[in-house]
Image (cartoon, rainbow, N blue to C red):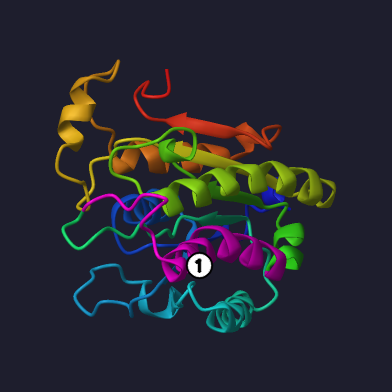
C-alpha cells in the first residue's frame, strides 16, 4: 500500500515530462527517491544527464488513441506487476495561429478541436482506466493538470485549449467519485502564469497585475503535485488547486 511501502520505491508515471512543469516534477519526485516513468512525444534525449531516463522513458503520442493504448501496455510492462502510486496527466497542447495568436472559437479548425481534446481530455481518462489495477494496488493518486484558462477567457490560451481544460476539471470531479471506492484519489491543479520556455509575449505584464506581482515557477507547481501525492493529502480528493498567485481572485 502507498502508506506501507518503506521497503520499496514509490512509482510515478508522468506525461509531458520533457520541459517546464513536467521537467520540474521529475526532479522533485526523483530527489525524494521515487521511480519516475516519463512519457512524451519525443525520444529520450541522449544529452540528458538523468541516469534513470532511458530505461524509464516511454515515447507516446497522446493525440493518437491507438498509440496511447499501446503506450499503456508498455507502461504496465515496465511496472511488471508493481503498484503505481501516482499518475500525473501533465501533457497538453494549445495550438496558435500562424503568427502565434490566440485561436478563438470562430476560427479554430475542427481538426484542431479534435487534436486538443484527444491530448488534453481523452488521454487522461484512457491512462487512468488502463492503469487502474496498478493504481488500486498502490492506493494511488491521479493528478490532472488543468489551467486558469479553464475558468475564464485568457488572452493567450485558445478556445479549444480552454474548454478542454474546463472539461478536464469536470472529469476530475467525476473520476474522484468513481475511482474513490477503489482507494484512488483524484485531484487537479490549475496553474496560472508559470515561468517556462513557452511563455507568450505579454505574460510578464499579466504577472505585474497579480496579487503576488510575479510569475510562478515550475518548482512551485511541482511541489504542489508532490504534496497531493503524499500521505499528508490522504483525505484530499475531487479538488482543483489554483496555483496562480491570486489570478483567480
- The residue lying at 59 percent from left, 48 percent from top is 167
Residue found at the very far front of the displayed protein: 106
Neighbor class of circle 1 (other Cα within 10 Å; few <14, some 14-19, many 20+) is: some
Q: With respect to residue 87, does 167 lie above or below?
A: above
Q: With respect to residue 25, does 39 lie above or below?
A: below
Residue found at the very far right of the displayed protein: 181
**Span shown in magenta:** 101-130
Q: Nearer the viewer, residue 120 or 245?
A: 120
Task: Name the quadrant of the C terminus.
Answer: top left
Prevalent SS, magenta region: helix
The answer to which quarter of the image holds residue 73 is: bottom right
Q: Report whether 248 appears left or right of 170.
A: left
- The residue lying at 64 percent from left, 43 percent from top is 170
- The residue lying at 34 percent from left, 46 percent from top is 157
Q: With respect to residue 40, does 107 lie above or below?
A: above
Local secondary structure at mark 1: helix
Taking the magenta stretch, the answer to whether it contains residue 109 is yes
Q: Nearer the viewer, residue 210 or 110?
A: 110
The answer to which quarter of the image holds residue 169 is: top right
Q: Position of residue 26 (x, y in %)?
A: 39, 56
Q: Report whether 117 appears left or right of 249.
A: right
- Residue under circle 1? 114
Amino acid at each position: 500500500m502507498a502508506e506501507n511501502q518503506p521497503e520499496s520505491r514509490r512509482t510515478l508515471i508522468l506525461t509531458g515530462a520533457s520541459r517546464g512543469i513536467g521537467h520540474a516534477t521529475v526532479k522533485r519526485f526523483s530527489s525524494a527517491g521515487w521511480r519516475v516513468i516519463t512519457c512524451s512525444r519525443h525520444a529520450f534525449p541522449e544529452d540528458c544527464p538523468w541516469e534513470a531516463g532511458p530505461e524509464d522513458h516511454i515515447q507516446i503520442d497522446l493525440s493518437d488513441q491507438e498509440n496511447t493504448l499501446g503506450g499503456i501496455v508498455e507502461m504496465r510492462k515496465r511496472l511488471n506487476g508493481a503498484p503505481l502510486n501516482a499518475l500525473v496527466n501533465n501533457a497538453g497542447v494549445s495550438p496558435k495561429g500562424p503568427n502565434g495568436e490566440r485561436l478563438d472559437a470562430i476560427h479554430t479548425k475542427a481538426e484542431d478541436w479534435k487534436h486538443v481534446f484527444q491530448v488534453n481530455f481523452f488521454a487522461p481518462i484512457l491512462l487512468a482506466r488502463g492503469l487502474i489495477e496498478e493504481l488500486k494496488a498502490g492506493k494511488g493518486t491521479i493528478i490532472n493538470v488543468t489551467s486558469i484558462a479553464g475558468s475564464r477567457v485568457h488572452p493567450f490560451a485558445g478556445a479549444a485549449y480552454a474548454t478542454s481544460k474546463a472539461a478536464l476539471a469536470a472529469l476530475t470531479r467525476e473520476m474522484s467519485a468513481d475511482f474513490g471506492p477503489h482507494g484512488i484519489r483524484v485531484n487537479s491543479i490549475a496553474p496560472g502564469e508559470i515561468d517556462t520556455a513557452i511563455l507568450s509575449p505579454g505574460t510578464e505584464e499579466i504577472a505585474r497585475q497579480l496579487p503576488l506581482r510575479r510569475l510562478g515557477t515550475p518548482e512551485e507547481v511541482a511541489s504542489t503535485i508532490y504534496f497531493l501525492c503524499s500521505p499528508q493529502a490522504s483525505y484530499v480528493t475531487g479538488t482543483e488547486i489554483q496555483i496562480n498567485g491570486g489570478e483567480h481572485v
